[in-house]
Structure formats: structure tokens, C-alpha cells
Image (cartoon, rainbow, N blue to C red):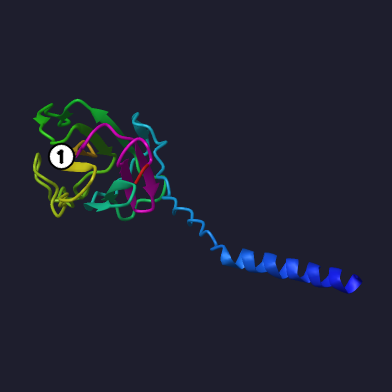
Amino acid sequence: MLHHRTICATLLLVGTALATAAVPAVATPAAPARATACSTGWGSLAKSDTDSTTMPLRNIRTGRHDCFDRMVVDLPGAGRGDIGYSVQYVDRLHQDGSGRAIPVAGGAVLEVRVAAPSYAPETGEPTYPARVARPLPGVDLTGYRTFRDARFAGSFEGDSQVGLGVRARLPFRVLELQDRLVIDVAHNWTGTR
């Protein structure tokens, strides 16, 4: 009798194993790759630093990133923390000294003032030979998600002024690094790529 129960139990286990094996495994879908969110907590209010440098502005360049468009103002010889600036949204860009309105394309205009001349203080020779109210030399904004236009407004009493046309009033940050000032403008407010 014991032998019969053992055989029945064995058959039951084998039958269960076969039934389980016959049921196809359900594939669980892989979790979708989460896109890294972009930081947008910078806000859109004015940002400034009251330092100044006598190191002249040498170049302005731009770049595209996944989360923002970037403008870099090169000031070789300026130390980290030595660059004064004021960056803010304005209704229109007005040239320092003359008050002349300079048209800047885009849904919003960021006025970028850097407390550094665009000429050599000793000789007055231009170190950044941009023409007033013209696009920045060497800057091509084709294909940028946020930047639309960039115009040089001139250098007056040791300050240089640029108008940066952007798609809309968007969050921005200013980074003061060794030899340069960086302005990043986010692609949107939501942080999506």
C-alpha cells in the first residue's frame, strides 16, 4: 500500500511539472529607459555680480546641448570670481551711451553685460572686432532650439554689451569660470529633453 502511495505522489509531481513546463513563460516588458530630466530651476530673473576686470573680451562663442543652448564669453587672464556681469530679460536692447535701440530677433531678449572692455585698455585697439548691431562674428545659430539671434551692442566705459535673442522667456543660469563667463538658456520650463 505504501508503495502505491509513493507511485501516486511521484506521478502527481511529474504531472504538475509537465503542466507547468507546458505553460509558456510570460515575458515581462523591460522598464522603459527613463530620460534624464533637465535642470530648469534657474528661473528667469536678473542675475549679476559686481566684480570687474581689465582683461578684455576676446571672443564670444555658442554651443548646443541636450538641455540648453550656451553662450561663452572668453576673457583670457580673468580669474574665477573676478568677472562682473549683469544678465537680464529686457523689452528692447538699448546701446549704452547712445540709448540707440538695437533690434534683436526672437520671442525674448536677454541683455548680457560683461564688466570688461572689448578693446585693449592701454592702446584702445579692439580685442573683439564685432560691429555694433551686427550678428556676432563666427556665431551661426542655425539649428539651435533656444537661441535665435545674437547682436553686439558695443563697449562703453569698460563694459561690453550683447543682445541674445531667444525663442521665449526661458530659465537661464550664469556660470563664472576661469577665463570665461557662461550663459545657459534652457530649452523649456518643464525639464523635458
> In the rendered image of this protein, does residue 16 appear above or below residue 46?
below
Locate the N terminus by quadrant: bottom right
> In the rendered image of this protein, does residue 115 appear above or below residue 17?
above
Q: Residue at x 51, y 56 (%)?
A: 28
Dot 1 lies on which element?
A: strand
Magenta range is 165-191
Q: Residue at x 31, y 38 (%)?
A: 188
| Type of the residue with mark 1 | Gly
Q: Is 177 covered by the magenta stretch?
A: yes
The residue nearer to you, when weighing 158 against 93, is 93
The residue nearer to you, when weighing 129 against 141, is 141
Direction right: furthest residue: 2
Q: Residue at x 27, y 31 (%)?
A: 169
In the rendered image, residue 84, in percent from the top left (x then y), is placed at 34, 39
Q: How many dots with numbers?
A: 1
- Where residue 89 sits, quadrant-wise, is top left
Can you identify the residue that label 1 sits on?
Answer: 154
In the rendered image, residue 77, in percent from the top left (x then y), is placed at 33, 55
In the rendered image, residue 69, in percent from the top left (x then y), is placed at 28, 47
The residue nearer to you, when weighing 161 against 15, is 15
In the rendered image, residue 60, in percent from the top left (x then y), is placed at 22, 50
Local crowd size for mark 1, using a 10 Å CA cut-off: few (<14), some (14–19), many (≥20): many
